[in-house]
Amino acid sequence: MARPDMPGRGMMGWGHERWGRGGPGAQGNWGDMHRFALVLGGVVAWMLGGFVVFKVAGALRIDWIGKGVLNAAAAIWLFSLWPLGGRRS
């Protein structure tokens, strides 16, 4: 049975290969902010997808609270890694 998260991983891998590592569309100008935006978009999509699954599955209130707390902690940690000053590598 195919895992439901595989298409998302495949698309992110393809996008990173095409634009992130010097593929035909990269032109060698991807920096830290581009990589950070790619990771941030993936993390936010998975966070929101989790809430959709909770809604469909009818999760308990404590599950919603735990998910909210863990998502907030992950978001704070991720934003603490924000590349400072918009520097490029």
Image (spheres, helix red, strand yellow):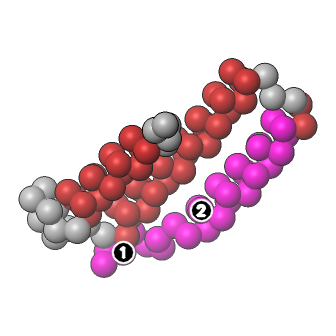
- Amino acid at circle 1: Arg
Label 2: which residue? 78
Q: How far across and down, in percent of the image, does residue 30 sit?
A: 25, 66
Q: Assess disc 2: are there few (<14), some (14-19) or many (≥20) residues with their C-alpha within 10 Å of its C-alpha.
A: some
Question: Along the horizontal axis of the image, is 31 left or right of 64?
Answer: left
Label 1: which residue? 87
- Looking at the image, is mark 2 or mark 1 nearer the viewer? 2
- Judging from the image, what secondary structure is the residue with disc 1 in? loop
Residue, far bottom: 89
At horizontal 76% and vertical 52% (from top left) the residue drawn is 70
Q: How far across and down, in percent of the image, does residue 19 sit?
A: 22, 58
Q: Is residue 74 magenta?
A: yes
Do we see residue 41 in this rendering? Answer: no
Q: How far across and down, in percent of the image, does residue 37 sit?
A: 41, 56
Determine the CA span between mark 2 and mark 1. 17 Å
Q: Which residues are magenta?
A: 63-89
